[in-house]
Amino acid sequence: MEHDLTFMSDGLKLSGVLHVPEGRKPGERLPTFIVLHGFVGTKDKSHVELVARMIEEMGYCVFRIDFRGCGQSEGARGEVRCFDQVADTRNALSFIAQREEVDPDRIGLTGHSFGAAVAIFTGGVDQRVACVLSLCGWGDGERKFRGQHPTPEAWDKFMGILEAGRKHKAETGESMWVSRFDVVPIPEELRKNLSPHAQFEVPVETAISMYNFRAEDVVADIAPRPLLLFHTAGDVITPMEQSISLFQKAGANAELMIPTGVSHFPLSDEDAPHTRALIDAWLKKFFPTPLTGRA
């Protein structure tokens, strides 16, 4: 069962969909995940919608949301700021905890890529978060960008974009807009995994916000709550070292999984069966649902 919902975050109306598994009994409150989409993405027709449906099938309530400025939510299009998204996540938690289907003491966060970074940071600063599941996420914006623009020429081009954006803003008061692929390069063959509702231009201030965002600084504060850092070994978009570094800084009950895979999208057709098995096993150990094994 799915419910289209809206909630408020800093005066903006944001859009979400609550998934409730069929096996739920009347009056039963279930562990729940809030699902966070990637870079200027959307909750719909996207990789995180696949994540949401997978977790629902495993017996959890799931609340997938559009961050402000994305999808069906209010807010200036494409003007993504990392700490705004942390605020949106915390407000989503406050909202969904009031639902009768949701156990307010067992609300976890999961996200993909950019959404995973936001999930980790939010889990580190908000003790209400019961667990965090990161999919191909990142913890240090500057180092992530260096991995995504690895040659001296690519790095100089990227830094030139940031500087040009700062200058343009100072001289005109307006943002300079650039292609999302100049900020986060994605090989042509993997772009089919992006939502058709995703945005393809962003203001330079969005890239600057990401550059300065460091979930690594707070990842240790998630402990002793469970943390899974899941990163495909062949990720050509977000460097795998980001999850390794996060794990090295994490505390108790953190686990790192680096399965074989060629994609940044672990629920793509070729990787989905392996991904599902690994995540299902982790959830049963660290964040079980009463629906497990229920006929």
Image (cartoon, helix red, strand yellow):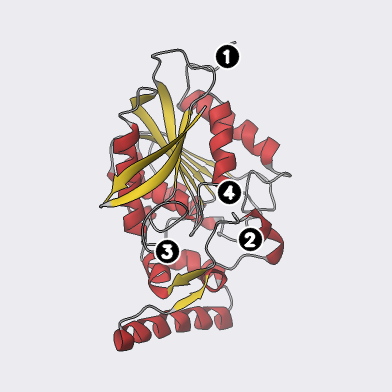
Residue 170's quadrant in the figure? Answer: bottom left
Crowding near pointer 2: few (<14 within 10 Å), some, many (20+)? Answer: some
Q: Earlier in the sequence, mark 1 or mark 2?
A: 2
Nearest-to-viewer mark from 4 and 3: 3
CA separation in Å, label 4 and label 2: 19 Å
Nearest-to-viewer mark from 1 and 4: 4
Q: Position of residue 252 (x, y in %)?
A: 39, 36
CA separation in Å, label 3 and label 2: 27 Å
**Disc 1 designates what residue?**
293
Instruction: Give the residue at x 42% y 85%.
Output: 164
Q: Helix, strand or loop at disc 4?
A: loop
Q: Helix, strand or loop at disc 1?
A: loop
Crowding near pointer 4: few (<14 within 10 Å), some, many (20+)? Answer: many
CA separation in Å, label 1 and label 4: 29 Å
- Residue lying furthest bottom: 171
**Disc 3 designates what residue?**
77
Instruction: Give the residue at x 31% y 36%.
Output: 95
* Residue nearest the viewer, comparing 102 with 117: 102
Q: Which of marks 4 and 3 is nearer the N terminus?
A: 4
Label at residue 46: 4
Q: Which amino acid does label 4 sit on?
A: Ser
Q: Where is residue 269 in the image (x, y as percent from the top left)?
A: 72, 44
**Disc 2 designates what residue?**
236
Instruction: Give the residue at x 53% y 16%.
Output: 23
